[in-house]
Image (tube, rainbow, N blue to C red):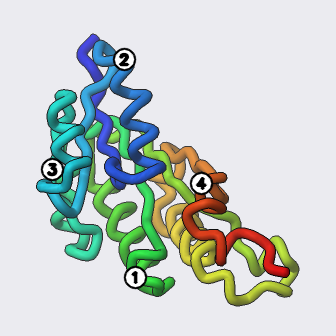
Amino acid sequence: MAPQLVVVIGATGAQGGSIVTELLKSPEQYKIRALTRDLFRPASKALAAQGVDVQQADLNSGRDTLIKAFAGANIIFGMTDFWSSGLGAVEVAQGISIVDAAAATPTLSHFIWSTLPDPVTISQGKYLNVHHWKSKSDVTEYIKSRQPDIWKKTTTILFPNYFENCVTYPDKYLPKN
């Protein structure tokens, strides 16, 4: 059987990078296409040196750019980064573009979506301003309600925090005296 093509969004970051690292261990099963904003970053060049097909794609460029980047994909790992813009509306728009482009990929058999739970729902309305969680959960709801065919192919993964966040961003993640 021919290797499946896996497209990984965020392949030069912590989440996507860990997925690429694991997929590289099974070259007989998977071909990897890494999407990045910057082809000339050292991390992008390092992936290319390992045989990864590295392509430029900006999540803010919209659905059509992603449709081209997803061409031939069997599996897509989709994720967004709230912190690059700091705006929930931007993250939701990026997520919807990813989902809609995935829906337009006829070869797709599995969509993996990195998300977080709805903070308003799980806190019973107590936490209304956890925007970096809410925007991800809004995209998940979009998949369920507006793209049911993709939802049938979707696995959601919850990556709340990395331990490294405590070291990298102590003011955000560690308690204050």
Ranked by sequence position, the earlier of labels 1 and 4 is: 1
Mark 2 in CB contact with mark 4 (< 8 angstroms) = no
Image position of 71 with respect to 144: above or below = above
Callout 2: SS: loop
Rate crowding at label 1 as few (under 14), some (14 to 19) or many (20 or more) other CA atoms within 10 Å.
few
Q: Nearer the viewer, residue 34 or 171?
A: 171
> Does residue 68 appear in the picture of this structure?
no
How far apart in space, not on screen, are marks 3 and 2 (Cα)?
21 Å
Could you say where residue 32 lies in the image, as x and y percent from the top left?
Answer: 26, 34
How far apart in space, not on screen, are marks 2 and 4 (Cα)?
27 Å
Indicate the amino acid at tag 2.
Ser
Residue ID for mark 4 = 164
Rate crowding at label 2 as few (under 14), some (14 to 19) or many (20 or more) other CA atoms within 10 Å.
few
Mark 1 in CB contact with mark 2 (< 8 angstroms) = no
| Disc assigned to residue 26 | 2
Indicate the amino acid at tag 1.
Ser
| Disc assigned to residue 85 | 1
Ranked by sequence position, the earlier of labels 1 and 2 is: 2
Q: Picture quarter containing residue 138?
A: bottom right
How far apart in space, not on screen, are marks 4 and 3 (Cα)?
27 Å
How far apart in space, not on screen, are marks 1 and 4 (Cα)?
21 Å
